[in-house]
Amino acid sequence: MESLEKLNLSYNNLSGLIPRCFEELHGLLHIDISYNKLEGHIPNSTTFRDAPLEALQGNKGLCGDIRGFLSCMSYRKASRKIWIVIVFPLLGMVVLFIALTGFFFIFRQRKNDSQTQQSGFGNTPGMLSVLTF
């Protein structure tokens, strides 16, 4: 493959990382890997640096020092922010739901206990009914 000049892998549903061996293909002049599911760092070669944006677009997880793409450091920071924005509110909602459920059962138990005490003393027929009159 050292004499390969053009490589078009677009629209192939490829996923994963771009192999580093593309950096060693010095004869490769044009590459098109658009509209796949590729992710990770874009290889540092003149083929990728000089490739038009259209040849790399449609891959949501690519990052690198190529114009039009996030650097991999800022991509990691962005994914960390997304993690914080999604996970912490969900955890807060779960904790709130558990707390409200616990308060509901405690309130219900106390209500049942107070009704049992009231009905147990006032509704017994016999001698105690005269005292409660």
Image: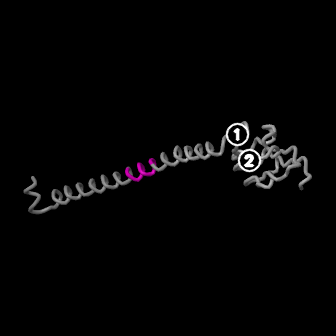
- Vertical position of residue 57 compared to residue 23: above or below: above
Position of 71 compared to 114: left or right? right
- Quadrant holding the N terminus: bottom right
Amino acid found under the numbered disc labelled 1: Phe
- x and y percent of residue 68 in the render? 72, 36
Label disc, if present, on residue 69 of the rendered structure = 1
Residue under label 2: 42
What kind of element bears circle 2?
A: loop
What kind of element bears circle 1?
A: loop
**Magenta highlight range:** 92-99
- Vertical position of residue 81 compared to residue 98: above or below: above
Residue at the location (26% across, 55% down)?
Answer: 110
Residue at the location (48% across, 45% down)?
Answer: 89
Q: Earlier in the sequence, mark 2 or mark 1?
A: 2
Position of 79 compared to 49: left or right? left
- Of residue 130 and residue 34, the one placed in the foreground of this image is 34
Real-space Cα distance between discs 2 and 1?
Answer: 9 Å
For the residues labelled 2 and 1, say whether their Cβ atoms are less than 8 Å apart.
Answer: yes
Residue at the location (87% across, 43% down)?
Answer: 30
Q: Main secondary structure of the magenta part?
A: helix
